[in-house]
Image (cartoon, rainbow, N blue to C red):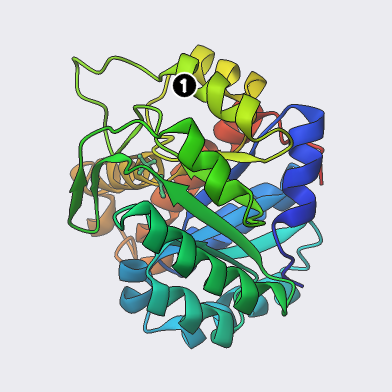
Amino acid sequence: MLVSAQEMLTKAKEGKYAVGQFNINNLEWTKAVLQTAQENSSPVILGVSEGAGKYMGGWDVVVGMVNGLIKDMKITVPVALHIDHGTYEGAKAVIAAGFSSVMFDGSHYPIEENIEKTKEIIALAGSKGISVEAEVGAIGGEEDGVVGGGEVADPAECKMIADLGVTMLAAGIGNIHGKYPANWKGLNFEVLAKIQEKTPGMPLVLHGGTGIPADMIKRAISLGVSKINVNTECQLAFAEATRKYIEAGKDLEGKGFDPRKLLAPGTQAIKDTVKEKMELFGSINKA
Ligand code: 13P
């Protein structure tokens, strides 16, 4: 059964570890993430962007697939199904479709409008026990065609949004979606410390988990980050393993063209990446 992200993140914040949000794109992705969480006794958050939701056929398909896999694969670890960077309409749509967690990303609105819209989503989600992530200050890089500039959030604005009663708060601290450029300055720990000071007890969310060095991840967790989002790194691992399979001519051997064989190395690569992240985030055996 799907659960809200509330309890797993409260425990993570108290226990000084982070729960991974791994974005899913299809059946293989979802199976790989769920299997890895189960094998390692880790709570997990499945992230679905609006683009990925559309790609998979729609929100009902996603909810049906995830609930079906949890049942048929006998998944017993806590799993939250979460819209990633939801628009106002998107957040409302997934609440109706059966998601257990939502992100409403109002970071591109003026702060007053972000507050108003976040409040409405909290009211809608709260009545159904659904957790809510809000965002302050655009996070850099490109996701679904939206480009940001590696911005840093204002801790006072973070407090304004946290005080509305969100479950978790994403705040830009120089993090970027996708691969980090060679001249990246790293995470801004001074700002992160100020945000945590102003929002004690609030699980903070680190977006753009791909490619952040392990020591920075650990430091971020020590400063209150309890949820870390990873997307691109699984995509790169999947693509690399699939390319190797084809370049080695394995699709031309016997029934190597069978999608169940063709997609197997990529799926295994996702599992390996997810396990590595769970180890780094400290969520193994925390289910
Ligand atoms: P990456 O693609 O950089 O891992 O970022 C994922 C993310 O933050 C999803 O919201």
Pick whichever, 44 or 144, lies toward us.
144
Q: Which residue is mark 1?
A: 191
Pick whichever, 279 or 89, lies toward us.
89
Q: Residues within 10 Å of mark 1 (few under 14, many from 20)?
A: some
Which percent across, then down, holds residue 211?
37, 27
Tag 1's secondary structure? helix
* Total numbered circles: 1
Residue situated furthest front in the rendering: 112
- Residue 41 against residue 260 in the figure, above or below: above
In the image, what residue occupies the spot 66% across and 51% down?
Answer: 44
- Residue 272 against residue 53 in the figure, above or below: above
In the image, what residue occupies the spot 40% across and 73% down?
Answer: 88
Pick whichever, 62 or 17, lies toward us.
17
Name the image quarter holding residue 19. top right
Name the image quarter holding residue 132. bottom right
In the image, what residue occupies the spot 80% across and 53% down?
Answer: 7
Which percent across, then down, holds residue 210?
39, 34
The picture quadrant for ligand 1 comes to top left
- Residue 71 against residue 216 in the figure, above or below: below
Pick whichever, 18 or 174, lies toward us.
174
* Residue 244 seen in the current view: yes
Does 234 sit left or right of 204 as displayed? left
- Residue 136 against residue 32 in the figure, above or below: above
* Residue 105 seen in the current view: no
Does 147 sit left or right of 130 as displayed? left
Which percent across, then down, holds residue 266?
39, 49
Which percent across, then down, holds residue 21?
55, 49
Task: Give the residue type at disc 1.
Answer: Val
Quadrant of the rendering where the N terminus is positioned = bottom right
